Image: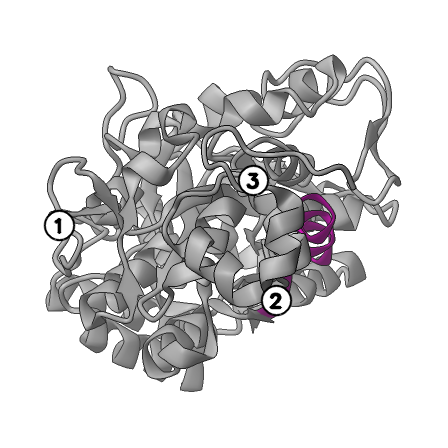
Amino acid sequence: MTNTTDKKTGISRRSLLKTGAAAVGLAAGSGAISGFPTIWAQNPITLRQFGTGVSNLNAIADKCKADLGITLEMTATDSDAAAQRAVTQPDSYDIADIEYWIAKKVYPSGVMQPMDVKKLKYYDKIVPLFITGKLTPDSVIAQGTAPHTVGFVEAQDGKTFAKQPTEWMTMVPTIYNADTLGIRPDLVGRDITSWADIMDPAFKGKAAILNIPSIGIMDAAMIMEAMGNVKYADKGNMTKEEIDKTIDFLIKAKQDGQFRAFWKSFDESVNLMASGEVVIQSMWSPAVAAVRSKGIACKYQPLKEGYRSWGGGLGLAAHLKGAELDAAYEYINWYLSGWVGAYLNRQGYYSAAMDTAKQFMSEDEWGYWVDGKPAKGDIMAPDGKVMEKAGAVRDGGSFVERMGKVACWNSVMDEDRYMVRRWNEFIAA
C-alpha cells in the first residue's frame, strides 16, 4: 500500500494503520474522514440489520462487504415480528429495514434516531413519492400510511411526524411496489379484472389472502369497495363500524370455505400458487416471477380499481454513535448509489433512487422492468437464471403506469388495536 494522504484531512492511510482502531474510531466519529471503505477494511465494523425477507438478502450483504468492508449481519422476519422486535429489542440491531407502516408504530417509542438529510448523498435522487407523496405533480395521494406522512420529524430529537419535509428523515427509502392479485391464468378459466373476483364462488377453496393485519386489511378494503359492500370515508383509517363490516364479511367468507389459506411469507405464497392449491390470491410481484421461473403459468393481474402499495426503508437504531454511526451512513449512501437498486429492480421491486439504479442496468433490462417495453432478449433473474423470454412485457406495464394507479398504502389506523384484534378473530374463526 502506498502512503497516500487525504488532502482534506492530512491523515495518511499508513498512519491510520499505525495508530490503531481507537484513533480511527475517533476520526471517523468526528466526520472528518471521507475514505470509509479503506477505514472499515482496517477497523472492521459489523452492522446488525433485521427486517423482512424481501430485502434482507445475502447478495446485498456480500456486495457491501466487497465494496465497503462493512459486515452486515442480516436477520429476516415477517412484518409483524419486525414491528415487535424494533420496539421490544432495540439493542439487538443497528439498522432496521422496515416498512413505513411499521415506522408509524415504532418511531414514537424513541428506539430509532432521525437521519440528517445533509449526510445523505443521494437525497435529491429519491423519487418524490417519498418526499411529497406524489409520483407526478398531478398525482392524487393515495389513502393509508403513505410513506411521506411518516418520513420526517421536526428535529433531531423529534418523535412526532412532520407534515412537510424537514432536515430529519425517519428512514431512508429503499424499496417499494404496487401489489395486486396473482392468478394462475391456466386454472382460473376467465378474465380477472377486479379485486372482487377473488370472492367468486367459482374459486371456493382456491383463494388466499395475506395474513398480516396492516396489509391484509387493505386487501380486504379493496375487495369490499370493488364488491360495492362498503364505501369507506378513508379505507386507510377505518372507523370501528367499517372495521366490523369488513371483518364480519371475511369471517362469513371463511366459514363458507372461500379461502384455502392465509399466508405470511413469500415462500408460502409461491408454494400455494405453484402447487395449484390456490388459483387467485394476494401476492407480491417477485413471488409471481418465482412461480413462472418454475415453468408454471402465473400472472400479476392489473385490476381496474388500482393497486395496494407498500414501501420500506433503512432506519438507524437510537444507540448508534461514533464510527458505527458513520459506517451506517456510508452503508446507506452506498445502498442508494445504484447497485442495490438495480438488484431490487430485477426482482420486480422498485428502487427509491431510480436514476442511480439505471446506471447498473442494461438498456433492455430498464426497458422491460421500468419502461414497460417488450424485452428484446431474455430477461435474467439476479441469480443468472432466465426469468422472462424475449418479447415478454411486464404485468401492469411501466413504472409510471403501475405506481400511478396506487389506490392505497399498507396502513396503521387510529383504531389499529381494535382492527388487529378483530383481524385475529377472523383468522381464528
**Distance in Å between CA atoms under marks 1 and 2:** 29 Å
**Distance in Å between CA atoms under marks 3 and 2:** 25 Å
Residue 235 place in picture, x, y as percent: 22, 51
Q: Quadrant of the C terminus?
A: bottom left
Q: How is the image coloured?
A: one colour
Q: Nearer the viewer, mark 3 or mark 2?
A: 3
Query: Sequence order check: which comes first, mark 1 or mark 2?
Result: 2
Query: Does dot 2 land on a helix, a strand or a loop?
Result: strand
Residue 139 shown left or right of residue 252 in the figure: left
Residue 62: say if magenta. yes
Query: Mark 3 near mark 1, Cβ–Cβ under 8 Å?
Result: no
Label 3 belongs to which residue? 35
**CA neighbours of label 2 inside 10 A, class few (<14), some (14 to 19), many (20+):** many
| Residue 161 appears in view | yes
Q: Residue at x 23, y 49 (%)?
A: 150
Residue 334: say if magenta. no
* Image position of 409 with respect to 118: above or below: below
Q: Residue at x 34, y 83 (%)?
A: 88
Residue 167 place in picture, x, y as percent: 20, 39
Q: Residue at x 21, y 52 (%)?
A: 230
Residue 74 numbered mark, or none: 2
* Image position of 48 with respect to 27: above or below: below
Give, as a single range, the part of the protein colored magenta: 58-75
Query: Does dot 3 land on a helix, a strand or a loop?
Result: loop
* Image position of 272 with respect to 408: above or below: below
Label 1 belongs to which residue? 155
